[in-house]
Image: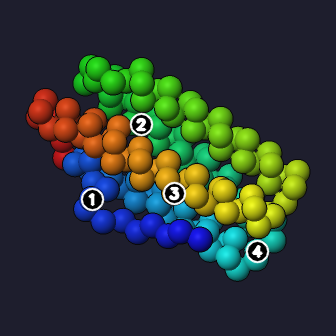
Amino acid sequence: MSEIAWDDSLSVGVDLIDEQHKLLIEKLKDLSDDFKQGHEQNKILRTLGFMIDYTDFHFTAEEKVMAENDYPGLEDQQQQHAEFKATLDSILLDLREDGPTEELVKSINIFLLNWLVTHIKGSDQKLGAYLNEQGQAR
């Protein structure tokens, strides 16, 4: 399975968002570890459930920052966030129905890792640059 670790290339330049991203990355590693170690389905579901809840919290906080600063990319971010949450819900349903099959585990790991890195290095770093231009970063 692919691994991810926080480094400065993932920073958006906004402490609140960076700290939340660090926790999401930590939970993604926890989920990957659960899969690797063959933990029971209930533990995997709890870890994924926490990740889903925290992702929702993070997206809400991020969108609040965008709205407060009249970020022009807010609607696009909201759409990306909604699509990601729908995919997480689908993953949770698949895990509940089929259990942590090797194919499902691999696709979950790849999807979550790719989406998170791509989103942070793309959309979220654009937000950070905008906030920096507005004097709102850090």
Mark 3 neighbour density, 10 Å: few (under 14) some (14–19) many (20 or more): many
Q: Secondary structure at mark 1?
A: helix
Nearer the observer: mark 4 or 2; the answer is: 4
Residue receiving disc 4: 39
Q: Tell me which amino acid carries mark 2.
A: Ala
Real-space Cα separation, disc 1 to disc 3, in angstroms: 15 Å
Pick whichever of labels 3 and 4 is earlier in the sequence.
4
Task: Locate residue 126: give its quadrant.
Answer: top left
Does residue 88 show up? yes
Pick whichever of labels 3 and 2 is earlier in the sequence.
2
In this view, the residue in front, 31 or 87, is 87
Q: Tell me which amino acid carries mark 1.
A: Ser
Residue receiving disc 3: 113
Q: In the rendered structure, are the residues bearing label 4 and label 2 in contact, judged by CB atoms less than 8 Å apart?
A: no
Q: Position of residue 118 (x, y in %)?
A: 41, 48
Mark 2 neighbour density, 10 Å: few (under 14) some (14–19) many (20 or more): some
Residue receiving disc 1: 9
In this view, the residue in front, 40 or 136, is 40
Q: Which quarter of the rendering shows the N terminus? A: bottom right
Disc number placed over residue 61 in the picture, else none: 2
In this view, the residue in front, 108 or 34, is 108
